Image: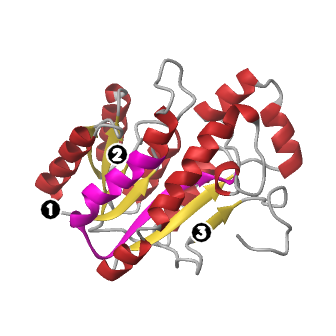
Amino acid sequence: MSNPLALHSLAGKRALITGSSRGIGADTAQYLAEAGASVVINYRNKEARAVKLADSIRAAGGTAITVGADMTDPASVAQLVAAVETEWGGLDLLVLNASGGMESGMAEDYAMQLNRDAQVDMLTAALPLLAPGSRVVFVTSHQAHFIKTTETMPEYEAVALSKRAGEDALRALIPTLTEKGVEFVVVSGDMIEGTITATLLNRLNPGAIDARKEAAGKLYNVSEFAAEIALATVEPIPADHTRLVGDISSFVPTDEGR
């Protein structure tokens, strides 16, 4: 797939993408790097993948560093922010992509820790590095964004509720961000084919992803959705701070907004 930022230059921009050692985050980082941004590849426990991605970006002439951090550990997040400040002195783009909650063996409230608390902690920690004109992008799903009005699969409900709680908590910070000249946008998409979440859901509820694909007409793949996130870093911010990707007719009447 061609780079969606082909007509945009991010030369001189510094970007941190959380959870970017693989999947959507990795493709987003690659798109931003190809457009000229210096990117931070963040990982929790996939260091080898992060290093491989950073090496690939540098081999293509881009700039990338890798920094490990557990988003649910404030001390770890503080170390991540400190590393970015030491390396680059600030940030122009913060993409809050890291999420989860369906992993086995985690605490009962892990989804809320990661999808709400950690998102707020990450933004709060990074805020001193964000100058006027910088932008924060929060990545979510339609199943989470519309959870207050549209039910989702029972297997995904806890994650959806936690991601919506995270979105609401971040939106509460918009006045503070605006006062500082920092832009904020939510990118919401349907289930994404090829992601860990889709794989786990299909394992728990066989046929669920195919059924959702049939209802939507199309599901974006990892690269396609990452392209939309990359575009959200440069395109004008919608009035409601929300960029809806793909079909939403299953979630709201087609003639209504958010």
Give the mark, 3 or 1, whose residue is nearer the N terminus: 1
- Label 2 vs 1, first from the N-terminus: 2
Q: Residue furthest front?
A: 108
Indicate which label's residue lies in the foreground, 3 or 2: 3
What's under tag 3, amino acid-wise? Thr
What kind of element bears circle 1?
loop
For mark 2, give the secondary structure: helix
Which amino acid type is marked by label 1?
Answer: Gly
* Residue ID at (65%, 50%): 144
**Span highlighted in magenta in the image:** 116-142
Q: Residue at x 62, y 34 (%)?
A: 197
Find the residue positioned furthest to the left.
Answer: 86
Q: Quadrant of residue 126?
A: bottom left
Residue at 48% over, 45% down: 115
Residue 89 shows which numbered tag? 1
Disc 2: which residue: 57
* Residue at mark 3 to residue at mark 1: CA–CA distance: 29 Å
Q: Residue at x 40, y 62 (%)?
A: 35
Disc 2/disc 1 C-alpha distance (Å): 21 Å
Residue 71 seen in this snapshot:
yes
Q: Marks 2 and 1: which is nearer the front?
A: 1
In the image, is residue 203 above or below residue 238?
above
Label 3 sits on a secondary structure element that is: strand
Q: Is residue 127 magenta?
A: yes
Q: Nearer the viewer, residue 248 or 224?
A: 248
Residue bearing mark 3: 242
Instruction: Please report contact status of discs 3 and 1: CB closer than 8 Å, yes or no.
Output: no
How far across and how far down the image is residue 198, in percent?
A: 67, 34
